[in-house]
Amino acid sequence: MRKIHTRIEALEAKIKELLTDRAASADTSRVPSEREASSRSASIADDENGRKDVVDRGCLSVETAQTYLEAFRVVMTPHFPFVVIPPDVSVHHLRQDRPFLFLAIIATASYENMPLQRSLGAEVKKAVSSRMILNGEVSFDLLQGLLIFLAW
């Protein structure tokens, strides 16, 4: 019974962290310049429309993403078999059809590159705050991605 309470407390802590990050990013003490505002809105629009992801922005290459996907399948999935990515699903397919799941997998599987993992973790938090909290989006893509991100 204590194990269940510990998991619930960990999930609550993650939610509080996401909300705190969201509040910090919505700092109203400074008015952004017109250029910053248009850049930010274009970036959010690109992310929401699926046109620009972490690969498109140059955070990592497709080959590196494929390596992390394979690491997720081989190393991580046996320990958390609740979200299984079939071997025939490619990085391209995930990026196109399940962008948040792709981001969550890459963020969790990049544990050997801590700066990259932190950067990708921040991307996950931004996506959650944008898609779920601001837009009220509910999807299987978000559910699976959150399961992975919160578990690891």
Image: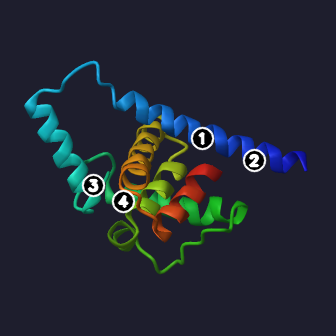
The answer for how far apart the CA atoms under marks 1 and 2 are is: 11 Å
Q: Residue 21: where, in percent of width, then height?
A: 45, 33
Residue 47's label in the rendered image is: 3
| Tag 3–tag 1 contact (CB < 8 Å) | no
Q: Residue at x 47, y 37 (%)?
A: 118
Q: Contact (CB < 8 A) between labels 3 and 2?
A: no
Q: Is residue 95 left or right of residue 87?
A: left
For label 1, count other residues whose C-alpha is less than 10 Å away and answer few (under 14), some (14-19) or many (20+): some
Numbered disc in front, either 1 or 4: 1
Question: Gap in Å between the C-alphas at discs 3 and 2?
Answer: 31 Å
Q: Earlier in the sequence, mark 3 or mark 4?
A: 3
Please, what secondary structure does the residue beneath circle 2 have?
A: helix
In contact (CB < 8 Å): disc 4 and disc 2: no
Residue 22 screen position, x and y as percent: 42, 36
Q: CA distance from mark 4 to mark 2?
A: 34 Å
Residue annotated with mark 2: 7
Q: Are marks 1 and 2 in contact (CB under 8 Å)?
A: no
- Please, what is the three-letter code of the amino acid marked with disc 2? Arg
Q: Which residue is mark 4?
A: 63
Q: SS of the residue at dot 3? A: helix
Is 151 on the left or on the right of 109, as rendered?
A: right
Residue matched to label 1: 14
Q: Residue at x 60, y 68 (%)?
A: 83
Alpha carbons under labels 1 and 4: distance apart: 30 Å
Residue type beneath disc 1: Lys
Can the viewer see residue 56? no
Camera-side residue of 141 and 26: 26
Structure colour scheme: rainbow
First along the sequence among labels 3 and 1: 1
**Along the polypeptide, which appears first: circle 1 or circle 2?**
2
Whether residue 84 sits left or right of residue 53 in the image: it is right
Residue 144 seen in render: yes
